[in-house]
């Protein structure tokens, strides 16, 4: 099993947009639909704070955290955005192919 703390890499913003969020308004597994309301909210906040302009000019500098857990029925890896939502939506808006630094963590790290 992957030791998440050891894995750092880059992923395009559009790929991270497909991962469910720990902040999702939908129960885990209830819907595969992307939480567009959450994305819209985070983008508006990023525009208001100036983060969008920063990401547009400098890219994403701080890694986002992705939790990896095993699905309880299939035992397939399940990825969930733990933090970095504003950075992800800002990068996706500026350039969907923008590479974002990502740190992966196993569910044991988060005490799940």
Image (spheres, helix red, strand yellow):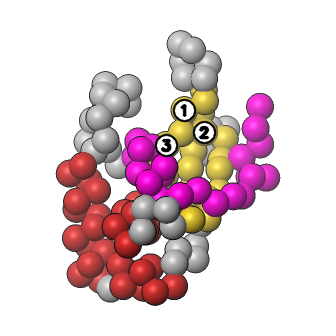
**Is 1 on the left-hand or right-hand side of 14?**
right
Residue located 60% across and 23% down the image: 76
- As helix, strand or loop, the secondary structure at mark 1 comes to strand
* Cβ atoms at labels 1 and 2 below 8 Å apart: yes
Which quadrant, please, contains the N terminus?
top right
Residue 2 in the image, given as x and y percentages of width and height: 76, 38
Q: Within 10 Å of the Cα at label 3, are there few (<14), some (14-19), or many (20+) other Cα atoms? A: many
Residue 71, by quadrant, is: top right
Secondary structure at numbered mark 2: strand
Could you tell me which secondary element the residue under label 3 belongs to? strand
Look at the numbered discs 1 and 3 and tell me whether their residues touch, using CB distance below 8 Å.
Answer: yes
Distance between the alpha carbons at the discs numbered 1 and 2: 6 Å
User: Which residue is tagged 3?
Assistant: 80
At 49% from the left and 43% from the top, the residue drawn is: 80
Q: Position of residue 20 (x, y in %)?
A: 41, 42
The first of marks 3 and 2 along the sequence is 2
**Gap between marks 1 and 3, in whole Å?**
7 Å
Range of the magenta residues?
1-22
């Amino acid at each position: 099993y992957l030791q998440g703390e050891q894995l750092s890499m880059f992923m395009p913003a559009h790929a991270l947009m497909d991962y469910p969020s720990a902040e999702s308004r939908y129960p885990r597994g209830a819907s595969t639909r992307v939480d567009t309301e959450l994305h819209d909210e985070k983008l508006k906040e990023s525009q208001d704070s100036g983060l969008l302009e920063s990401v547009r000019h400098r890219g994403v500098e701080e890694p986002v955290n992705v939790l990896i857990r095993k699905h309880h029925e299939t035992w397939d890896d399940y990825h969930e955005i733990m933090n970095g939502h504003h950075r992800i939506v800002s990068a996706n808006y500026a350039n969907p192919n923008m590479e974002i630094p990502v740190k992966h963590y196993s569910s044991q790290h988060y005490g799940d």
